[in-house]
Image (tube, grey):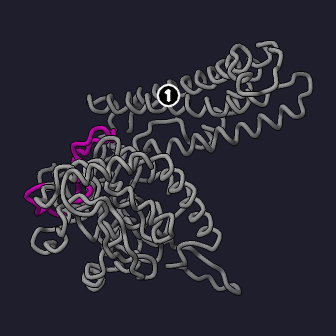
Amino acid sequence: MSRPRRGESLLPLITIASDAIAVEAAFLFAYWLRFRTGIFSALGFLHEDAPPLQGYILASLFVIAVWLLLFNARRMYGTRRNVNLSDELINIIKVVSLGMLLVMSAAFFYRTFSYSRVVIVLVWIIAICGVFAGRVLMKALERQSYKHGRHLQRAIIIGGEALANQVYTRLHGHLSFGITITGYFADAPAQFPQGIGTASYLGPLASAPEYIRSEGVQLAFIALRAEDHQRLFELISECEGINVEFMMVPDLLDVMTSQVRVRDLEGIPFLRLKGIPLTSWERITKRAFDITVSLVILIILSPLYAVIAALIRLDSRGPVFFRQQRVGLDGQEFTMYKFRSMVAGAERLDTTAGLGIRSDARRTALGRFLRRTSLDELPQLWNVLRGDMSLVGPRPERAHVVRQFGTVVPKYLDRHRVKTGLTGWAQVNGLRGDTSIDERVKYDLYYIENWSLAFDIRILLRTLRAVITFREQE
């Protein structure tokens, strides 16, 4: 039977306490900024006499209760093994904003005490920052706990072929995920010299339920072929009553990348396997977001553009910008811009030098730094502003590459159903440069079929983190 682990109750309790402290601190700090400093008077705000602090403290207790309930309703208390910080920030903004609307509604009807609108706005901003900072700290503490082998979730893999090998290779040895894989079940030992072939073979599929029951396994990754799915149903049925979580890894590209939906027409149910990726309103929303963000960044970073341009001129002969034809939305070609990071004319040697390699001898001294920091990609913001590209989307390729892969890689051309992007879901998951085209296509199509503005923001935040930590981009 699965045994409860102390960390799974302790960490959520600490997180709740951290959130409560952050919200209370937000009220106190906002009150102090508004009424105990001259900052807002200097900014031209009307002078307000300081109301009793007790009124804000009482309000904070109500707000803390509301926000904690909202966080709990969004399942934001618990171990955070599979949650990244960009998702966490988006959820925090949503919950805090909703909570603030509820608080403002309550304040409207509560006439006994008048709350400063400036304080309310400050609480909203400071609470988001404070709660997120607490979540960052808790994430770090949780990962450190996992790295030291504490509170790990015991997991097994059901399957022993290529898909199972991929799961094991991705997850084994990464204790920071909070998972330790004890072995795998398959009808025969895996025939891989590396990867899952080095893991413990626990027996045939039929013996998995008893092992799960006796060893207290909490998580089972299902990595079976389509023809084995009947055996999967039997396995799940035999595990009825056991506290174990099953996570199935899709083995079919169509299943993995399509939004399967049921639609009723005149009483007849139809399965929609593929639809239009973006509605008209979603295209407008995405375009407005692209224009706003790219314009702001271009203005802010304009001095940096001038510095990089001057350094390129000093570093080597040739133009500042590298221009190349790439394929975008609906297969239409456009001119993509980058800061030049290679010697002039290097593109003529693409076929002999190799694409996407990290040690390309054609790169200049400055170019290696620009690639490492992704600063060479900055001119593509002009492509975004013009409408050739989006901030987020599949990375654009050259026409001959599209023709080559379009004939051999399933669904490769479906990448052009949306605008190509400066960054993408595949890139933030490590699929850049000299990596599997098939894997990139899977991630690109998943993004297309599951687009949302929140998804774009999440990818941009993860891209920013990669740039700050100097992870080389494509």
| Relative to 174, 49 lies left or right | right
Of 202 and 338, nearer the camera is 338
User: In this orientation, which residue lies closer to the viewer: 276 or 395?
Assistant: 395
Q: Quadrant of the N terminus?
A: top left
Residue 167 is at least partly visible in this image: yes
The image quadrant that residue 410 belongs to is bottom left
Residue 234 is one of the magenta-drawn residues: no
Q: Is residue 175 one of those drawn in magenta?
A: yes
Residue 259 screen position, x and y as percent: 50, 71
In percent of the image, x 21 and y 49: which residue is there?
366
The residue labelled by disc 1 is 134
The answer to which quarter of the image holds residue 182 is top left
Secondary structure of the residue carrying numbered label 1: helix
In this view, the residue in front, 328 or 56, is 328
| Residue depicted at x 69% and y 15% | 37
Amino acid carrying label 1: it is Gly
**Circle 1 residues within 10 Å: few <14, some 14–19, many ≥20:** some
Position of residue 29 measured from the top left corner of the image (x, y, whole percent): 64, 19
- Provide the residue span drawn in magenta: 165-194
Image coords of residue 59 (percent x, y): 76, 23
Q: Is residue 40 above or below residue 156?
A: above
At horizontal 37% and vertical 80% (from top left) the residue drawn is: 413
Q: Quadrant of residue 459?
A: bottom left
Q: Position of residue 56 (x, y in %)?
A: 76, 19
